Amino acid sequence: MNLEAVPRVASITKKEFLEGYFKPQKPVVIENGVVDWPATQKWSLDYIRQVAGDKIVPLYDDRPVNHKDGFNEPHAQMKMAEYVDLLKSKPTKYRIFLWNVLKEVPQLQKDFNFPDFGLKLKKNLPMLFFGGQNSSTFMHYDIDMANIFHVHFDGKKECILFAPSQTKYLYKVPYSLITHESIDFENPDYDAWPVLKSANGYKAELNHGDVLYMPEGYWHFMKYVTPGFSMSLRSWPKNPMNFARGLYNILVMRTYDIAMRKMKGQKWIEHKNAKAITRTNSLSKSRPRINSLDI
Ligand SMILES: O=C(O)CCC(=O)C(=O)O
Ligand SMILES: [Fe+2]
C-alpha cells in the first residue's frame, strides 16, 4: 500500500504542534509527550494485573459485525488477572475496547494528567484498550470525529492511518464507521479491492510511552505486535464540518443503523457490505475478480 511513515519527534512545543500538525491535520508521533507521567514508569500489564486483577473485563474478538450482537456488546468476560495471564501466555484475539478502568480503579488516576499540546482535552476519564499478540481492530474512525492522542504502554503496536480525504478509496460501509471487514490492510488483495491501490496513507509503530496524534476523523487500523495497552485522550473537532458530522453520526446515523438492524437483521448488514463494494468500485475501470462472490 502507499503508506508513508508518520513523522516522529522526541518532544514538541505547543506552537510547533499547532502549526505543524494540528492546523494542517497531519499525524505525528511524540516520543516524550508524557514522560512526566508516573504511568510511563509504572504502567505495565503486570501492574494492571496487580491493581485491577479482580475486576471483570468485557472482551471482544474480531468476528464480523452480526445483527444478533448488540451494539458494542462484549463477546466474552473474565477477570483482569486471567486476561493478563492469557495475554502473556499465547496470542489471543480478545481485546478490551473502551473500558473505563480508571473509574473502576481510581488509584490509577494519580498516574497521568491531561497534557497541554495546545488543544482543550475532554476531561471525562479516558478509556483504555488492551490487545494480545497479533490482535487488531477493524479499520475505523471514531464516531465523535475527535482529535485523538493515543498513548501506548508495555508492548509494540502497528498503526495504519488514512486521512478523511481518502475515504472514497477505502470501501467504507455506509451507515457505519468501518471499511469492509474482509480487507486485510496488512496485505491487501488488490484483485479483490482494486481501488485501494489509489489510497495514500500513513504507518506508525508505537512503543511504550509513545503518543500518536490522530487528527479529526482519521481512519485507524491498529495491530498489537506484542501484548500491550493504550489510552486515548480526546479533543472535540475544531472544524465545524467535522463537529456537525460527529453530532450527525451520534444522533442520526447510529440511531438509523440500530433501527434498520432491528427491522431487517442480517440482510441490512449484507446490503451495506455490498454497497461498500459497488460504491467504491464505481471509481475503478478494471472489473474486480472476487468481490462479486462476496455480495
Ligand atoms: O487500540 C485499539 O484497540 C483501538 C484504539 C482506537 O481505536 C482509538 O483509540 O480510537
Ligand atoms: Fe478508534
Image (tube, rainbow, N blue to C red):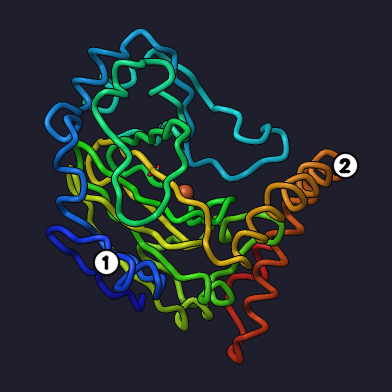
Which of the 4 quarters of the picture holds residue 35?
top left
Provide residue 245's location: percent of width, then percent of height.
Answer: 66, 61
Label 1 element class = helix
Q: Name the residue under label 2.
A: 263
Q: Which amino acid does label 1 sit on?
A: Lys
Provide residue 10's location: percent of width, then percent of height.
Answer: 12, 59
User: Where is the N terminus found, in terms of image quarters?
Assistant: bottom left
Q: Residue at x 40, y 23 (%)?
A: 101
Q: Which is in the foreground here, disc 2 or disc 1? A: 1
Q: Residue furthest top?
A: 54
Depth check, front residue: 91 or 79 = 79
Q: Can residue 10 be seen in this view?
A: yes
Q: Which residue lies furthest to the bottom in this view?
A: 285
Q: Can residue 193 be seen in this view?
A: no
Query: Is 143 left or right of 224, judged from the image as shown?
Result: right
Give the mark nearer the N terminus: 2 vs 1: 1
Depth check, front residue: 110 or 143 = 110
Q: Name the residue under label 1.
A: 15
User: Where is the C terminus found, in terms of image quarters?
Assistant: bottom right
Query: Is 173 left or right of 123, judged from the image as shown?
Result: right
Q: Which amino acid does label 2 sit on?
A: Met
Distance from label 2 to label 1 (Cα)? 50 Å
